[in-house]
Amino acid sequence: MTDTSLRTHSLFLIGEGIGKSRTPALHEREGAALGMPVTYRIVDALELGLTAADLPDVLRWAQRLGCSGFNVTHPFKQAIIPHLDGLSDRAEALGAVNTVVFRDGKATGHNTDWCGFQRPFQAQLPGAGQGTVVQVGSGGAGAAVAYALLDNGASRLILHDVFPDKAQALAERMGGLFGADRVCVGTDLADSMAQAEGVVHCTPTGMATHPGCAVPEELLRPEQWVAEIVYFPLETELVRMARAKGCRTVDGGGMAAEQAVEAFYQFTGVQPDAARMHAHLREMVGGAPR
C-alpha cells in the first residue's frame, strides 16, 4: 500500500451553503504544520447546481483527479452511501457518512461525527448524559450524535424532528443497536424537555445562513445542560439563551474541530495535533469552549 503521508493530499467538502466552512483552513494549516502538502476546496452544491443525482459524477471526478478523499455534509450524508464501495463499521451502523477516503482504487465511507461530538461532550461535561436526553434533529449529523449519546450511556433518548418519519427511522436504527427501550420519538417537545437532564440540537437552525432557535427559551431549566452542533457562529441563539438561563453548555466548536481531527487521520494516515486544530478552529470563529 502507498504511504499516504508522503503524497500531496487533495481534499474537498461537498454540501449546500458551505461557503463559510472553516474545514478547508483546518486541514490545510495542520498539513502545513506537519510538513505535508494539503489542498482543500469547497464544492457548494447550491452554487454549482448539484443534486444527489450528481454524486456518482462527483466520485468519478474526485478519483480521476487523484483526491485522497472528501468530506460530506448536509444534505448528502446519507445519499452518498449507495455510491460507495464500502463503509466502516461505524458508518454502516449509523447509516450516515461524512468522510470518504480513496484507497487502493476504492471509495470507503467513514463517520467521524459521532466521536467528534462525544469527545468534547465528555471533556466539557464529565459524567453528564446518563439520564434522559432530548435530541432535536434526526438527519445525518443527528444519527451520529444519537449514537454518541447512547454509547455514552444515555438511559433514554427522545428524538424530535419536524419530519416524524425521519425520527422514527433513526429510533429504529438506534434501537436495534442499543435496545428499543432506550430510544423513542417524542411528540410534545415541552413534555420531553420536562423529563430531560439535557438537550442536544442537531439541525441547521442557528447557523448564519439559517437564523433562529429550534428550542423555545421557556422550555430550558437552569439545572439542564445544552449541547449544540452548529459552530458558525459559536454562540448560537440557543447557546446564548441557555447560558443566560444558567445552563451548562457545549458549543459546536468542539465537534467541528474533533471530527476534522479524525478525518485528517483517515485521509492521510498521520495523527494530527488535536489541541492545535481545536485552537485553530476557535481562532477562526472566536471564543473559548464553555
Image: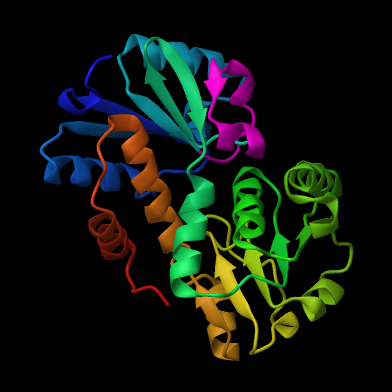
- Residue 196 colored magenta? no
Q: Is residue 241 above or below residue 264?
A: below
Q: Looking at this rendering, what residue extends furthest in the right direction? A: 187
| Left or right for 42, reference 15 | left
Percent position of residue 160, x then y: 78, 59
- Residue 89 colored magenta? yes
| Left or right for 157, reference 129 | right
The segment highlighted magenta reads 73-94
Quadrant of the drawing holding the C terminus:
bottom left
Instruction: Please report the residue visible at 28 percent of the width from the left and 14 percent of the height from the top.
Output: 1
Percent position of residue 177, x then y: 73, 44
Q: Looking at this rendering, what residue extends furthest in the left direction? A: 35
Q: How is the image coloured?
A: rainbow
Choose between 188 and 126: the one closer to the eye: 126
| Left or right for 120, reference 281 | right
Q: Is residue 117 above or below residue 199?
A: above
Instruction: Please report the residue visible at 40 percent of the width from the left and 44 percent of the height from the top.
Output: 19
Q: Is residue 116 above or below residue 235?
A: above
Instruction: Please report the residue visible at 19 percent of the width from the left and 46 percent of the height from the top.
Output: 29
Q: Is residue 95 visible?
A: no
Choose between 271 and 259: the one closer to the eye: 271
Instruction: Please report the residue visible at 55 percent of the width from the left and 89 percent of the height from the top.
Output: 244
Picture mark count: 0
Percent position of residue 61, x then y: 41, 13
Residue 210 sits in quarter = bottom right
Q: Is residue 24 visible?
A: yes
Percent position of residue 252, x then y: 48, 62
